[in-house]
Image (spheres, coloured by chain):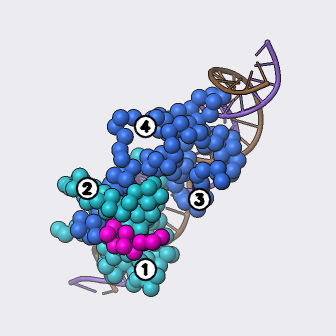
Chain colours: A cyan, B blue, C purple, D brown
Amino acid sequence: MGAGVELTVDPDDPTPPYEQLRRQLSDLIGAGRLAENHRLPPVRQLAGDLGLAVGTVARAYRELEQAGQLVSRRGAGTRVAARGPGTRDPLAQLADELVARARALGYDDDQIAGSVQGAVRRRRGD
Amino acid sequence: MGAGVELTVDPDDPTPPYEQLRRQLSDLIGAGRLAENHRLPPVRQLAGDLGLAVGTVARAYRELEQAGQLVSRRGAGTRVAARGPGTRDPLAQLADELVARARALGYDDDQIAGSVQGAVRRRRGD
DNA sequence: CCACTTGTGTCAAGCCATCGATACAAGTAG
DNA sequence: CTACTTGTATCGATGGCTTGACACAAGTGG
């Protein structure tokens, strides 16, 4: 089964589960890892897998629908909405952020670029 | 401008304020933006500035002290703890963070490494 | 010693998120 | 049409977080 994407909830994170879920899905959709019209698991199934109540998952879906990232229809499930024009590659955003912060700490570009090579190598197989 | 660092709390973020504060401070300390022995604002002052109760700020300080990142002493205030021998290079930490987040979004290592090259090029001359 | 600062502890009150269960509404599939 | 799927809504109970106020403990500086 090509499960496709893993969604997780950290019970030790004080952030409410519905919000953890909402953020993950929002990021995944924004990153294009979830294609348009891709179908998400039914609320009952996802709730069961994550050990959450149905209403908790439903809330995450609902908020994402209000944000225009999902479309829910009773009986037909919940699917990824069409992507708007204001979408930017989140990886580029993360990379920009890293460069800005690292420069603020006084590192030069070679060090910065090299650091990520090292991090990838270090965390290979996580 | 001796203000030093900006701490903020977003009321619209469902993450508890004490946790928002804890994370910001933890990140700042880990990244080396708050030097060893740097003194943080008194709980009453920070609580007043952020519109929080004293106990809420105190909780953030307390958890960071338990984590070894801060040292609090009555009457003497709260300061950034000494960085132990196991201290990570701040840049390595930033890089690890980027890799972890990008992988969670489904990017592969080549994309991640390349994104930083692109960001360095893009932001050349900032 | 003294006044002040600062972190810590307690308490009651209220809000919010979660859970578990249940019922209902609306679409799908036969 | 019927059976099933799926999202939505509600209810009470539980627990965590915040607030505001207050008291207390411990260090600082004169």
Give the residue drawn at x 46%, y 82%. Answer: A86
- Residue A95: % across, % down: 38, 66
* Foreground: disc 4 or disc 1: 4
Q: Tell me whether the residue at label 2 lies in contact with that at label 1, contact meaning CB atoms closer than 8 angstroms.
A: no
Is residue B43 highlighted in magenta? no
- Residue A35: % across, % down: 31, 79
Q: Amino acid at mark 2?
A: Gly
* Foreground: disc 2 or disc 1: 2
The chain under label 1 reads A
Query: Farthest residue toward the left?
Result: A1
Label 3, secondary structure: give it: loop
Q: Are the residues flagged by discs 2 and 1 from a single subunit?
A: yes
> Is A28 or A48 nearer to us in this picture?
A28
Numbered badge on residue B83: 4
Numbered badge on residue B10: 3
Give the residue drawn at x 51%, y 43%. Answer: B35
Is residue B125 highlighted in magenta? yes
Numbered badge on residue A118: 2
User: Which region of the structure is painted magenta?
Assistant: B115-126
Query: Could you tell me how far apart the alpha carbons at marks 2 and 1 are, in whole angstroms?
Result: 30 Å
